[in-house]
Amino acid sequence: MAILVVGSVAFDSIQTPHGKREKCLGGAATHFALAASFFSPVRVIAVVGEDFTGTEESVLKQRAVDTQGIEHLPGKSFHWSGSYLRTLNEADTLNTELNVFESFEPKIPSSYGDSEFLFLANIDPALQSKVRAAMPKVKMVCGDTMNFWISGQRDKLAAVLRELDVLLINDGEAKMLANDQNLVGAADKILKMGPKTLIVKHGEFGATAFFSERSFADGKKRVPFRAPALPLAEVIDPTGAGDSFAGGFFGYLAAQPEVTPAAFRAAMFYGGVMGSFCVERFGTERAQSLTREEIDQRFALFKEISHLE
Amino acid sequence: MAILVVGSVAFDSIQTPHGKREKCLGGAATHFALAASFFSPVRVIAVVGEDFTGTEESVLKQRAVDTQGIEHLPGKSFHWSGSYLRTLNEADTLNTELNVFESFEPKIPSSYGDSEFLFLANIDPALQSKVRAAMPKVKMVCGDTMNFWISGQRDKLAAVLRELDVLLINDGEAKMLANDQNLVGAADKILKMGPKTLIVKHGEFGATAFFSERSFADGKKRVPFRAPALPLAEVIDPTGAGDSFAGGFFGYLAAQPEVTPAAFRAAMFYGGVMGSFCVERFGTERAQSLTREEIDQRFALFKEISHLE
């Protein structure tokens, strides 16, 4: 089933210990869409400037991502500059130019109306709510956010959280959102804010899903599920790893006949798989050369590193 | 098969957000022995002072731990004081009184001579080497160390590492020992220092085993194995969690007919299980009330939180 993603399509200028790239294609919606495209049809809502040309668009189109909803405006695209020279675990933002993204007003093409899965990438919660409201019939909504919105737009974020099937954030964001330094305590509090299920990403240590009674149709509360990450000898560029995780997770889930606990667990493994590929090269480079066969091989590897038998 | 452990049997004074305990029974060898005792016979080599009475000894004896090798000397036992008020992830040492431990000279009772598994808990590497040399016929040697010995006794530690089947340390120690901030890179370097297998403990994120061609009899190099930790709503006292992990891991392994890859993986799960119990109460309290049935139930839970099927 088709996934609609709303978020940033941007240019990133990135420095890591392995080199640098100037204005390479990036943005949460881009990384999400490329990862999800290996499993399900993906449609993007975003805004770009005149510097986003056919070259950039072809990266998405070659993965059959529907770009009709990418609005082209005069001016420049969102441009983020970051450095991982201090640590690969966290980007130091050097510069953020919002450009056309500053006045982003998501517009949903009528051809996107039958999308059954909705991913609200990390943007202003007011915009997330707006897109959610415009898609009342979707089956499943998954969303991301960040510290900036948690501290600055708590009321608007609360409205988004009430609409989410799955909230996907990292450890620091979860602890900040719940104001609880214990992850299990934080998860309990966040699940009471609205999301049926919470996935907390732990970077190199994988991700944990915390379930509520509302997670699955049977009304049963389940124990958490922890998916591993692959121990990597080299991380070339961490940018987009979290969005690639989300894309692998949600893309796989949207392709299943039903969202069962078993499908959810496998989806988390595919999330880890897509995150592990993303960081192997700069920007979208690895996703562009990736094959489904490589994905399935790595899924088997994830099982091998984590399963008793 | 019987395990011989050499290490500290001590008193701990502990502060955590959940309360405090003055001079409760602790020490690496104590926590290791109690955890391992649920799987295999355990024999302890340590030194204590006059403050170590029948009350403390009975904690070990009730778990059928052989205490013949605990030497009693005039004076006081090793006494460590630590606080977890700043963070539960790391103890702030408030005071260390080595007392009789300062001149510890391990003496191995003749009745311990047929021990087939040897655990060298975190003590001076010169003493670890001495005990290792006195037990030439053991089948398997597992060892721990810490930043203090890594920075201060590198040559003596190197001699210990060459004798180890398994080195069991945490993330920070592994990166420090290898002088490499990437865990996979650090593991490669450490495996070249001698240990056939390296287990790196990640606290709340579980543990990863890194294998070499020498890990198992078949000479095959395997991909890493990651065992989960249980997400816990409450950590009452983290003291001894790492030693309990080691005890569960090595205790289970010593009880198997052969050290196969499958047995090794299960042993890592049992390590996580024993660590998860340890932190539920202060000091050795949880280990004292624990049953094998509870252990097996939690092993099943570890499988449930980490396995696709």
Image (cartoon, coloured by chain):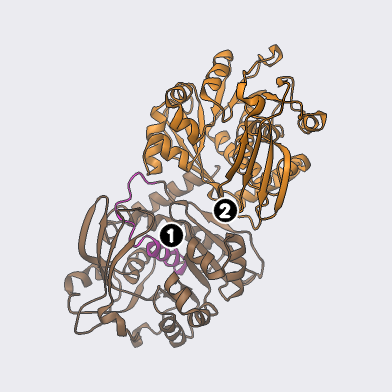
Chain colours: A brown, B orange
Task: Please tell me in which quadrant of the rendered image residue A216 appears.
Answer: bottom right
Q: Position of residue A286 (x, y in %)?
A: 28, 56
Q: Is residue B228 above or below residue B156?
A: below
Q: Which residues are magenta?
A: A232-255
Question: Residue at label 2?
Answer: B87
Crowding at dot 2, Cα within 10 Å, few <14 / some 14-19 / many 20+, comes out as few
Specify the amino acid type for callout 2: Thr
Residue at the spot x=61%, y=70% of the render?
A: A189
The residue indicated by pointer 1 is A271
Q: Residue at x 25, y 60 (%)?
A: A14
Q: Secondary structure at mark 2?
A: loop
Marking on residue B271: none
Residue B26 % position (x, y): 69, 36
B108 or A226, which is in the foreground? B108
Measure the alpha-carbon separation of dots 2 and 1: 30 Å
Name the residue type under label 1.
Gly
Q: At which x and y percent is residue B270?
A: 63, 40
Q: Is residue B43 visible?
A: no
Q: Find residue A251 and report its horizontal and vertical position in percent.
A: 41, 66
